[in-house]
Amino acid sequence: MQNIWIEGKKDSPVFVLLHGTGGNEQDLVPLAQKLDEDASILSFLGDVNENGMARFFKRIRPGVFDEDDVKVRALAMRERLDRLAKERNFDASDIIAIGYSNGANLLAAMLYLNEAPFKRAVLLHPMVPLSDIRPKRLNGKAVLVTAGKNDPICPVDESETLVESLKQAGAGVTLSWFREGHAIGRAEVDAVQEWTQNIKKG
Ligand code: MLT
């Protein structure tokens, strides 16, 4: 899977970035650089091609995922992160993983499957990634979930179901609501900044 690596300063965070459907590995780089200009950045380009749009797993139609494919690709991302952490000399558990939409859904699937090496994740407009699994043993994970009250792709009750399942599994979850739809608004960027600064200190 294609990725970009931007080497940051020693002892600064490592952000791993996963874009949304139709995006690319550059999309979330400005957000990560705004969060911490000294951070290292590892950003992926999804290798599923849906009519020319890059994604991280297959779907049957909008909102309906190919869940077997989700599982295979979540595991592959775990292995990829573990390998790249060794190659790039960082600790995979120290990553702050940030995903938007389809990328957030893959990160959520990694959490559901207990295949997330990272302890901290920012899920921007995620959905419930797998219908046949309840996540377990997520103690020690800190997750920020953002959601739009008027998001046509990710309904309000789905955000709430996702957050509830992560909490029941023991994760520390912050849910931030915004008025907008599926796009990442300015207030949302501010909320991500505040959350990442607080967990860096914690
Ligand atoms: C997905 O397919 O992962 C979700 O529907 C979000 C998106 O459209 O990317």
Image (cartoon, rainbow, N blue to C red):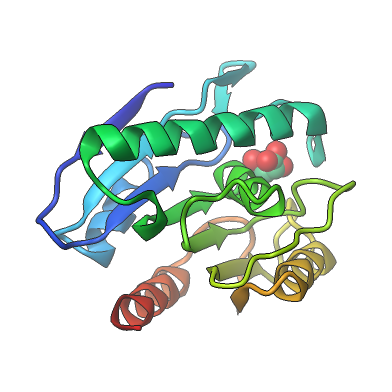
Residue 183 position in % (x across, y down) = 55, 56
Q: Nearer the viewer, residue 198 or 25?
A: 198
Q: Residue at x 78, y 67 (%)?
A: 165
Residue 138 position in % (x across, y down) = 64, 66
Residue 30 position in % (x across, y down) = 28, 52
Is residue 178 in view? no
The residue at the far right in this view is 132
Q: Is residue 193 left or right of residue 61?
A: left
Q: Tell me the quarter of the picture where residue 166 sits.
A: bottom right
Q: Is residue 166 left or right of residue 37?
A: right
Q: Residue at x 49, y 32 (%)?
A: 79
Q: Is residue 191 left or right of residue 85?
A: right
Image quadrant of ligand 1?
Answer: top right
Residue 86 position in % (x across, y down) = 29, 37
Is residue 3 in view? yes
| Residue 194 against residue 136 in the figure, above or below | below
Q: Tell me the quarter of the picture where residue 168 sits.
A: bottom right
Q: Is residue 184 left or right of residue 115?
A: left
| Residue 28 against residue 149 in the figure, above or below | above
Q: Quadrant of the N terminus?
A: top left
| Residue 159 against residue 114 in the figure, above or below | below
Q: Residue at x 71, y 75 (%)?
A: 167
